[in-house]
Image (cartoon, rainbow, N blue to C red):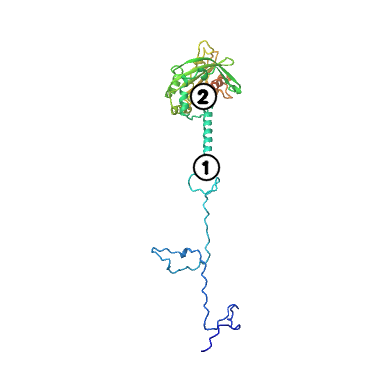
Amino acid sequence: MPPRPSTFLHPSARRTGAPWETPTETTTRLRPVPADPPAAPSAPRRHDIHLSSSAESFTDPAPHVTDPPDPTPRPFVSLATPDTYDNDTVQPRTGGARPRPRLAAVVTCVVLGLGLIGGAVTGSWLSGDSEGGAGTPDVFTAAGALWHSIPVDELFPPTVDGEGAGPGGADRTWTRIAVAPDSGCKDAFDPLLRKALAPAGCLRLLRATYTDATRSHVTTVGLLFTKADSAAMGTLRARFNSQGLDRRRDLMPRPYAAQGTLAAGFGDAQRASWTVSVLTDAPVVVYAVSGFADGRTFTEPQPAEDAMKADATTPSAQGGLGHDAQGLADRIERSLRKTVNSATEKPS
């Protein structure tokens, strides 16, 4: 039996260029070469994924075809994680109810806002700064019912202080000398003024006459309670403003000449200055007309707004009668607003 080839390698029989750990095979029986280790799996590329309408077997996959590599590397784009956090919590929001701290803050802001609005509305009503805005239904209704439920001293106080109401900012004080019985409007206005006020209707008319501290001026103040609603009062006010009805001499209100008082001779011919104000937050028209207590007449009476101007030189302006009419009307209007506010306040 021939000798079996040796399986040992001579040190000099190495493969050229091979590392010394891998000698050249010289026998006829080759050593099995282990297979290359499997390549590490890589993320599938977009072009490597193919969908088929037919079912495919996981045990016998279709031949894998790869596209040639792109000449330039494809940029990697990453989308940011959606922002699901807020300032009040570190827990992600799921689209449901907002966290309680945020809800509490919102509720607090709403409550404070309503309080500020309510305070502003009350302040606007008391100061008369309504600028044609309608009042709330409760206030408007309460104001219309005051003529038969409020003592006369609250509507027409016995003494009215007019701080800064005189010419040059001087103080004024007016004292009530007569109160007219509540009545209708038949004889209280000139025919044209009565016609202009007719769309609002006449529910009741209250009047009082005052004199100044020197007892040389007399002024009648009136509160006409109408039958109109807020919209009708707004329409009436707009008409007076646009047509200048409150400045026309043929639309002056008449004074209340109480017999046995300083105002006994205060008639139509003695009217020197006047003002008419149509309210929209109450069904009331406030007016005032002034003159001298000595009975002197005026051929050119002047609206209070004009008589109060610094450069006015008419007898009405120089006598301060425009200030009397406007100042007294403003303060009686404020007194009315305070009375309405007290009547509509709810006990705490």
- x, y (%) of residue 4? 53, 86
Provide the residue designation for mark 2. 342
Q: Residues within 10 Å of mark 2 (few under 14, many from 20)?
A: few
Q: Amino acid at mark 1?
A: Arg
Q: Is residue 252 visible to us here?
A: no
Q: Quadrant of residue 157?
A: top right
Q: Residue furthest top?
A: 260
Q: Secondary structure at mark 1?
A: helix
Residue 146 visible to the viewer: yes
Q: Nearer the viewer, residue 151 or 192?
A: 151
Whether the residues at callouts 1 and 2 have beta carbons within 8 Å, the answer is no
Q: Is 119 or 293 nearer to us in this picture? A: 119
Residue 294 lies in quadrant = top right
Label 1 Cα crowd, 10 Å radius (few <14 / some 14-19 / many 20+)? few
Which residue appears at 53% of the width and 33% of the height?
115
Seen in the picture, residue 173 relative to 120 is either above or below; the reply is above
Secondary structure, mark 2, is helix
On the image, the x and y values in percent for residue 193 come to 45, 21
Residue 100 badge: 1
Give the mark nearest the N terminus, 1 or 2.
1
Residue at 46% in and 65% down: 48
- Disc ID at residue 151: none
